[in-house]
């Protein structure tokens, strides 16, 4: 279980059914896997029955009291303030930032393709998405060496957070505070991220910026209801949250998407046919992106089988009744994208990579929460539209110019960090089309 949390959740649900009660140390825990029950939990969260579990408290050294971690009125206030900066229409202005960062990567890939040099998709996508998030937040790139250190720090934090959360549940004690080598690495990684991001201020970022950097827009933003404006410490928490949450998920989502494409030559050919038909130049326009229906299904199918966020957890503040199961207060209620996205009652041949299952025809009748890669209810992923725009733009731009060839000797498996990460490299050879 320590090694493969999604695997543990899957086998538990397969063996014991759609609502399973078990103990995580002293913690009463429920795994809920039926879409209608997941919907019920999200609805009840709105009614104040659930809140983000103590689960998330272990993330406090990283995300502070930012939107990812907070609850109650503090969360409402933050969500109201941040929401306007992540709507579909607002994020459209970052489309060029994404496309030009991808174009730089593709130039570099041309040389690698000529030299028959494989690339590691996981590493490449982390670098690319980091450079996009830095440009969105600060209107500039972070110097290469510092960016690499920040990417490594995110890897360390993501890798350790799940273990820290479980240790806290099971041992309810000080294990996470001991001066062990792993805990020291954790602290050092937090410091690296803080040091790297602290040098960018709203004032320094706005100079010479073609598009106003997000950090400057956030500094000026006010909550309409309470007139609250963020101070420097609150800004730090949101900036780290956005930089981290925007990277760890999207970069892995892209790496998995390309991995699945490289394993399915028919899928690759269909994306290429679609992209050839829709794109007029090398940098896609927003309008062209909206016409890439098949590419969108492929991304969804990858998010289904390899969901970067593979589980969410909530606490019951008071008791709840899920169908006819009584769940007492202070329970941990968890739902897993990894489990429900493979539920045989909702997905035919669930382990098969089959993008067409997302066509309108085949989606008909499927319950809303059979597929929830971005969570749901009032705490649905804030960056969902940005993530989808990044994934569609980058997938289409890569497939327009390259065919990816997987190395058949190379076995790819996942590692459950905070997100679902590839355990090792995902190496592919690039063939220019
Ligand atoms: C493929 C990419 C992504 C996936 C799969 C993903 C998934 C999720 C999920 C499942 C949640 C809900 C967690 C919960 O309920 O416990 C969430 C929340 C969140 N995500 Fe994402 N995310 C992605 C990209 C992004 C991006 C690009 C950003 C920001 C730039 C972002 C920022 C956030 C924030 C701030 C929250 C907390 C929202 C709140 O609690 O109100 N995410 N994400």
Image: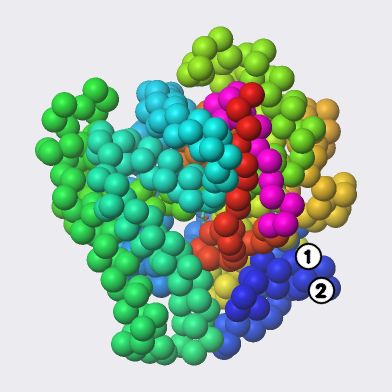
- The structure residue drawn at horizontal position 41% and vertical position 30%, both measured from the top left corner, is 104
Q: Position of residue 147 (x, y in %)?
A: 31, 50
The circle drawn on residue 18 is 1
Q: Is residue 315 left or right of residue 91?
A: right
Alpha-carbon neighbours of circle 2 within 10 Å: few (<14), some, or many (≥20)? few
**Along the line of sight, the residue nearer the viewer: 15 or 319:** 15
- The structure residue drawn at horizontal position 77% and vertical position 71%, both measured from the top left corner, is 11
Specify the quadrant of the image occupied by residue 23: bottom right
Residue 67 visible from this viewpoint: no
Specify the quadrant of the image occupied by residue 429: top right
Alpha-carbon neighbours of circle 1 within 10 Å: few (<14), some, or many (≥20)? some
The answer to whether residue 179 is above or below residue 112 is below
Q: Position of residue 330 (x, y in %)?
A: 53, 76
The answer to whether residue 72 is above or below residue 128 is below
Q: Which residue is mark 2?
A: 16
The secondary element bearing badge 1 is classed as loop
Disc 2, disc 1: CB below 8 Å? Answer: no
Q: Which residues, given as a range, are shown in magenta?
A: 397-410
Q: How is the image coloured?
A: rainbow
The secondary element bearing badge 2 is classed as helix
């Amino acid at each position: 279980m320590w090694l493969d949390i999604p695997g543990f959740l899957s086998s538990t649900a397969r063996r014991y059914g759609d609502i399973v009660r078990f103990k995580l140390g002293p913690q009463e825990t429920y795994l809920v896997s039926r879409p209608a029950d997941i919907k019920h939990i999200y609805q009840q969260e709105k009614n104040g029955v659930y809140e983000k579990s103590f689960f998330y408290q272990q993330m406090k050294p990283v995300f502070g009291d930012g939107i990812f971690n907070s609850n109650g009125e503090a969360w409402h206030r933050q969500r109201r303030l941040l929401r306007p900066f992540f709507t579909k229409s607002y994020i459209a202005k970052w489309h060029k930032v994404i496309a030009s960062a991808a174009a730089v990567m593709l130039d570099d890939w041309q040389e690698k393709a000529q030299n028959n040099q494989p690339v590691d998709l996981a590493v490449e996508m982390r670098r690319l998405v980091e450079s996009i998030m830095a440009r969105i937040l600060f209107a500039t790139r972070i110097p290469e060496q510092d960016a690499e250190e920040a990417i490594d720090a995110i890897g360390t934090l993501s890798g350790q957070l799940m273990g820290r959360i479980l240790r806290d549940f099971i041992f309810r004690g000080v294990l996470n505070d001991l001066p062990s080598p792993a805990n020291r690495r954790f602290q050092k990684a937090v410091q690296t991220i803080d040091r790297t991001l602290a040098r960018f201020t709203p004032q320094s970022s706005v100079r010479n910026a073609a598009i106003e950097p997000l950090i400057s827009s956030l500094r000026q933003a006010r909550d309409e209801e309470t007139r609250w404006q963020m101070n420097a410490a609150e800004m730090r928490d949101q900036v780290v949250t956005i930089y981290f949450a925007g990277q760890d998920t999207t970069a892995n989502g892209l790496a998995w998407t390309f991995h699945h494409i490289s394993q399915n030559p028919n899928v690759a050919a269909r994306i290429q046919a679609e992209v050839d038909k829709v794109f007029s130049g090398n940098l896609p326009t927003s309008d062209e992106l909206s016409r890439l229906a098949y590419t969108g299904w492929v991304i969804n199918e990858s998010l289904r089988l390899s969901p970067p966020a593979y589980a969410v957890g909530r606490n019951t503040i008071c008791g709840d009744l899920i169908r006819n199961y009584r769940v007492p207060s202070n329970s941990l209620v968890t739902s897993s994208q990894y489990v429900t996205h493979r539920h045989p009652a909702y997905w035919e041949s669930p382990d098969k990579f089959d993008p067409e299952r997302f066509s309108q025809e085949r989606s008909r009748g499927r319950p809303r929460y059979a597929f929830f890669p971005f969570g749901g209810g009032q705490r649905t992923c804030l960056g969902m539209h940005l993530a989808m725009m990044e994934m569609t733009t980058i997938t289409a731009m890569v497939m327009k110019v390259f065919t990816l060839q997987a190395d058949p000797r190379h076995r790819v498996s996942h590692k459950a960090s905070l997100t679902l990460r590839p355990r090792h490299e995902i190496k592919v050879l690039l063939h220019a089309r």
